[in-house]
Image (cartoon, rainbow, N blue to C red):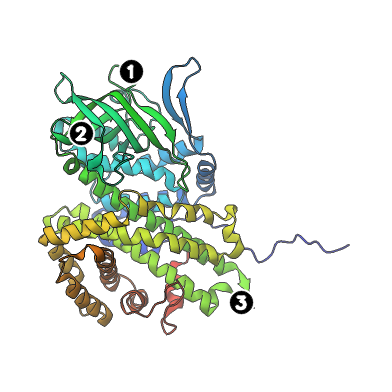
Amino acid sequence: MAPSTHTVTNQPPPLVGYDVFAADQALAEAVGRHVEAGLLDEARAELTTLGRAAGSAQVQEWGAQANENPPRLRTHDRYGHRVDEVEFHPAWHRLLGKGVSAGLTAAWDRPAGHVRRAAAFLVWTQVEAGTCCPLSMTHAAVPALRTDPELSAEWEPRLTSVVYERELRPAHLKAGALFGMGMTEKQGGSDVRAGTTAARPLAEDGAYELTGHKWFCSAPMSDGFLVLAQAPGGLTCFLVPRVLADGTRNVFLIQRLKDKLGNRSNASAEVEFDGTWARRVGEEGRGVRTIIEMVAATRLDCVLGSAGLMRQAVAQAVHHCGHREAFGGKLVDKPLMRNVLADLALESEAATTLALRLAAAYDDGGEQERALLRIAVPAAKYWVTKRCAPLAVEASECLGGNGYVEESGMPRLVRESPLNSIWEGAGNVQALDVLRALTREPQALDAYLREVGLARGADHRLDAAIKQLLTELAELEGAEARARRLTERLALVLQGALLVRYAPPDVADAFCASRLGGEWGAAFGALPHTLNLAAVVERARPAH
């Protein structure tokens, strides 16, 4: 009998049935570092439960199903009534429900709530990033609503609930609610002050009628939305409920869903307001100031989301190369492949370490930490999200042709990878925001320099990079054209300082040599060969 030509050999087993949280040493150590001892066991138990779910075959299948079955817009019911509903695959609802029950919208009043949520967000992103959009919007709406104590008292208990209720009905009848956001308009883009949506005051105190459009509305299936519109007193923030208190649908006309590169499981919409009832949030003319805390929180989620995508891409690459044999040995043991994997692992760990440090600053809430966030959040959002796409592509290449095939899951990561760099303010917006903080808020730069100064003297390349950065910061006149370079250096120096303080010496050494010391190429895999790259790769291995 002729031998079979279909014997499967030299293929890695699926990366499944493992704890996504515990298998990520950088993340687990960051949680241990930033959560106080009395809460640590509880936090680890929660994250382990979520990590095991994220690594299970069932939940991973839900992620694939949600991605393969994107949402559909239903504008009218069978009788011709306008309903403007978005229908999702059951897998989407399962994933979103698990995210809500895991506390991904419940950070603001929990002890160490932001670090615990950040770690969970990073874990859950690795299943299917699309569901993280409504979780992020809902979480981030809380500080904006707190500018109005009455609105906050009404909505915050529902937004921070761990109960997911998918049906559209009056919010006061629901145990949990989700929020979306609408800021961007066709003619303005990131320049939200160019918005033309009009708000006309009604007789009821604080109530308005909105007329206009939003070119991008996040999570259009939500129970409420924070939007910007032009009131008589200027650009103002408003809360638009999806269903009014008497049970009637608010005027919320979904024109179409966006056909996006990635993020396929999540709905993003164009919506029209035509006599839409809204409640003012904050004062007239102070819309940007009111909503800015929401924007800052969503920007941190962009950093966390990119860190999660990077971690999953690295985990898949290291897992594959740890099992795949070529040219007489395991790929992971080949010097050149080891260099690539180590370089990817450094990028991932630096992103995770920085993201969790920023979450810890939110938990602290002190003046010094708030000042640090003013520079560090836009700098991290700029740099970490931009590193995600090249890392995802390189990690896919580690799988060879297998990484170009949908079944591997890598193409989904590649398509998702540019998203966080574009949303919530693209690169130039972040760089200009950093420049604005540098020139107008000296306490922000002081807080940043204190933070990186904690690592001075530990690595000569870091010390040199700090000195060079100070030289660049000494003259900010006409700095807009070099705002990207400044922002990149601020992010890299901060990452280097954190790794020198917290990461194993081999990781810190490799990062400082490459990112700060100039011993690096334009593509991944050009680290100095004298470094202990095997230790860096082993640390990134998702052992299970």
The percent coordinates of residue 51 (x first, y second) are: 43, 52
**Dot placed on the residue nearer the N-terminal end, 1 or 3:** 1
The reply to whether discs 1 and 3 touch (Cβ–Cβ < 8 Å) is: no
Q: Which residue in the structure is indicated by mark 1? A: 248
Which amino acid does the dot numbered 2 rest on? Gln
Which amino acid does the dot numbered 3 rest on? Gly
Which residue is drawn at the image coordinates 26% and 38% (left, top)? 195
- Mark 2 or 1: in front is 2
Which residue is drawn at the image coordinates 43% and 27% (left, top)? 85
Q: Which of the labelled discs sits on residue 67, or is there none? A: none
Q: CA distance from mark 3 to mark 2?
A: 65 Å
Q: Secondary structure at mark 3?
A: strand
Mark 1, Cα crowd under 10 Å, few <14 / some 14-19 / many 20+, is few
The percent coordinates of residue 65 (x first, y second) are: 54, 42
Relative to residue 448, is residue 237 depicted above or below? above
Q: CA distance from mark 1 to mark 3?
A: 66 Å
Mark 2, Cα crowd under 10 Å, few <14 / some 14-19 / many 20+, is many
Q: Nearer the viewer, residue 335 or 363?
A: 335
Q: Which of the labelled discs sits on residue 230, or is there none? A: 2
The percent coordinates of residue 305 (x first, y second) are: 37, 53
Q: Which of the labelled discs sits on residue 329, or is there none? A: 3
Which amino acid does the dot numbered 1 rest on? Thr
The reply to whether discs 2 and 1 touch (Cβ–Cβ < 8 Å) is: no
